[in-house]
């Protein structure tokens, strides 16, 4: 028996209901020093702005329900955080470029890769030890091409 339960230390915040979400990431996407959340469900990528969790549609993809995994970092080195997402199968990795005003403008979608099938995870890391993030995607499908 634990000394104290996790419930006594964690406050639950429901920021979105009604759609199954496979991925969500938290970071200060708005530059106000508060953690915001980006999640993907129901054919849309949404930004929830703290502290009131205002919902902003960043991108729509009605041809499929959701991305399965996501990450974030400043992909284009312009000083703001961008969003990276992966679809399982057929595989696809995209990034959403945060515009000058990420709370009122749509984020532009850019294709990173569409040959990795069965993507089951994304993670960032500084492999070259040069201060630059690299992106890694894992696959759960034995389909070519293999990197």
Image (cartoon, rainbow, N blue to C red):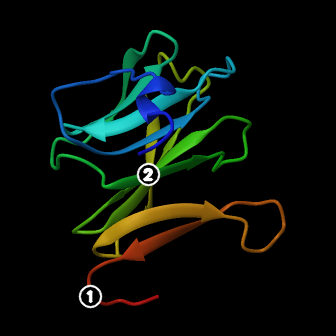
* Residue at image point 53% right, 24% down: 102
> Height in image: 146 above or below 112?
below
Q: Position of residue 54 (x, y in %)?
A: 41, 13
Q: Residue at x 66, y 45 (%)?
A: 74
Q: Earlier in the sequence, mark 1 or mark 2?
A: 2
| Label placed on residue 88 | none
The quadrant of the image that shows the N terminus is top left
| Left or right of residue 102: residue 134 | right
Position in image of residue 2 (x %, y %): 46, 43
- Percent x, y of residue 30: 60, 22
Q: Are marks 1 and 2 in contact (CB under 8 Å)?
A: no
Looking at this view, is 39 or 99 the one in front? 39
Query: How far apart are the two marked residues, 1 and 2, measured between alpha carbons?
Result: 22 Å
Residue beneath disc 1:
143
Give me the residue at 40% from left, 90% from top: 146
Q: Say which residue label 2 marks.
A: 70
Q: State whether residue 101 is above or below residue 115.
A: above
Q: Residue at x 15, y 48 (%)?
A: 63
Q: Secondary structure at mark 2?
A: strand
Q: Under tag 1, what secondary structure?
A: loop
Choose between 74 and 127: the one closer to the eye: 127
């Amino acid at each position: 028996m634990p000394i104290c339960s996790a419930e006594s230390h964690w406050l639950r915040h429901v920021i979105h209901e009604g759609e199954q979400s496979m991925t969500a990431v938290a970071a200060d996407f708005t530059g106000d020093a508060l953690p915001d959340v980006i999640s993907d469900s129901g054919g849309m990528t949404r930004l929830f702005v703290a502290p009131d969790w205002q919902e902003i549609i960043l991108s729509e993809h009605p041809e499929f329900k959701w991305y399965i995994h996501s990450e974030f970092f400043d992909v284009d080195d312009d000083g703001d955080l961008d969003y990276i997402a992966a679809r399982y199968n057929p595989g696809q990795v995209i990034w959403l470029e945060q515009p000058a005003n990420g709370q009122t403008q749509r984020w532009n979608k850019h294709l990173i890769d569409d040959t990795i099938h069965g993507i089951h995870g994304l993670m960032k890391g500084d492999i070259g030890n040069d201060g630059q993030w690299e992106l890694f995607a894992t696959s759960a499908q034995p389909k070519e091409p293999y990197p």
